[in-house]
Image (cartoon, helix red, strand yellow):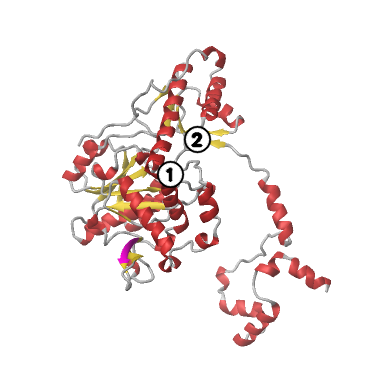
Amino acid sequence: MKEDYVKKKNFYHRHIGPSCSEINNMLKELQYSSINNFVNQTIPKQIRLKKKLNLPNSISEYQYLNHIYRISKKNKTYRSYIGLGYKNTITPSVIQRNILENPSWYTPYTPYQSEISQGRLEALINFQTMISDLTGMKISNASMLDESTAAADAMFMIYQEKIKKRKIDNNYHFFISDEILPQTFAVLKTRCFGLGIHIINDSHRNLKKKYNNKKIFGLIISYPSSLGEIYDYTEIIQYAKCNNISVIVSTDLLSLSLLKPPGEWGADVVIGSSQSFGIPMGYGGPHAAFFSTHEQYKRFLPGRIIGISVDQKNKKAFRMALQVREQHIKREKATSNICTSQVLPAVMASMYALYHGKKGLIEIAKCIHEYAKRLEFLLINHINHLFQVNTFYFDTLRIKTDFISKIKKVSERKKTNFRYINKNHLTITLDETTCQEDINHILSIFYEAYNQNKKTYKKIKYHTNIHSKYRFPSFSE
C-alpha cells in the first residue's frame, strides 16, 4: 500500500509514459519480449547514445515545484529601458480577468476553434480594422507569430509575386536596412539563405549612392529605427518606385497613433508587433505580429483574413474569408501556417484598442513622447559633455557619452538596464509605464556616473511648453 502511494506521488508516474501492464500488452501485440529487444530491432546502432544519461534521481511534483521556486528567488528584477521591440505595458484589469485568465478565450490559442466562434472572429476582424487604420493600408491579416517572421514572410511574399509574374530572376538582391531590429535581421538572413536570395545590409542612405547598379527587388526599413530615429524616407520611396523595388516597413504600432502612417507615404507592406497594445512581455514573447498590405497582394498574403457574410436568416456572420494552410496546399507553395497566428494576444491587442479608443491611444502615445522630451531636456541641461543624437524620435533617446563604462556600472548596481550600442552610445526607451519617478531614477544614474551633484541643478526645471511641437519629421506629399 505504501509503495503504491510512493509511485503515485512521483512525478514521472503521473505524467510520463504508459504503465507496466500497458507496455507488456503493446510488446505482446508487436511480438517482442522486452523493451530492449524492441529498441535493438528498430533503432540503428549508429544513432544510439553509447553511455547512460547523467541525470539526477527523480523527485515528486511537490519537491520539483519547491526546487523551481528556490531557483526563481535567485532572479533579479531590473527596470529595463532596452527597447528592441519589447516594452512594458499596462494590461487593463478587465482584459486580464475576462480574456487572458478566461479558459473560453485562452484555450483556443490556435485559430482552428475560432472557425466556430463568432465572438473570437469579431475580435479578430477588429484587430484587422485597427491595423489597417493605423498603418494606412487597404488590407490586413488577423495576426502572425512575431515581428521577425512577419518580416521574412513579407520578403518572401513580394519575392514570390515577382517571380511568378517574371518581373525578376535569381540574380536580384534584397536590401536590409542596418537599423532594423537585430532579431528581425537574423531571421531574414536565415530565410534568404534557405531560398538562395542575395542580401545587402547597409544604411538606407546608401541605397541610391552605392547600389544604383544592383538588381534589387525589395527593401525593408524601420519606422522608427531600432536606435530610435524617425527618418523621412520620401527620397528612398521615390527611388524605390522608379526602380520597381517593393518597400517593407517595420514599425512600432503605438507610435503610429501620432506618426504619419506608412501606407500614406508609399509602403507596400507594413509589419510589426502588437506587444505594446497591453500584452505583457512574457519573458520575450513571441507576441502576435501584424501584416498589412495592398489589395494586389491579397492572394499572396500569409495567414488568414476574417470577413463578414450574411447567413440563411439574413444575419451578419463572421468567417475566414481567405486562409493559407500548409495542410491544404503543396509544400513548395505554402507561405505561412496559420496556427502560428496567436489568436489570444491578437484578441487582447484588439480589446486594448477598443478599451482606450482612438483618443486614448493618442493620449498614451503623447504621454510617452512627452516623457522622452522631458528626459532629453533634463539630461542635456544637467549633464556636461552629453549629447542626444536622434533628431526625430518617438520614445527612444540615443545618448552620446564618454562615460559608458561608468554609466553601465552604476545602472547595474541600481538594477537598471539600458541598451549599450558601442563605446560611446547607448539608448533609453521609455514606455506606457514610465512616470516622473522613473525619469528621476535615470537622472540619478547619470549624476552619479558623471560625479555631479544633483542639488546644483535644482534651478533648471522642465516646462511642457519648451517643446511645443512633436519631435517628428514632416513627410513631403
Q: Which residue is mark 2?
A: 81
Q: Is residue 63 left or right of residue 309?
A: right
Q: How many neighbours does mark 2 have within 10 angstroms: few (below 14), some (14-19), or many (20 or more)?
A: many
Q: Label 2: state its secondary structure.
A: loop
Q: Is residue 414 magenta?
A: no
Q: Which mark is residue 430?
A: none
Q: Residue at x 44, y 58 (%)?
A: 343
Quick check: 200 above or below 326? Answer: above
Q: Which residue is mark 1?
A: 356
* Count of numbered tags: 2
Q: Is residue 469 left or right of residue 28?
A: left
**What percent of the width, then of the height, locates residue 125?**
36, 57
The magenta segment = 305-309
Q: Is residue 181 left or right of residue 231?
A: right
**What percent of the width, then of the height, locates residue 176?**
32, 44
Q: Earlier in the sequence, mark 2 or mark 1?
A: 2
Main SS, magenta residues: strand
Label 1 is placed on what type of residue?
Answer: His
Is 85 or 358 nearer to us in this picture? 358
**What percent of the width, then of the height, locates residue 272?**
38, 47
Classify residue 466 by image quadrant: top left
Q: Residue at x 40, y 41 (%)?
A: 361
Q: How many neighbours does mark 1 have within 10 angstroms: few (below 14), some (14-19), or many (20 or more)?
A: some
Label 2 is placed on what type of residue?
Answer: Tyr
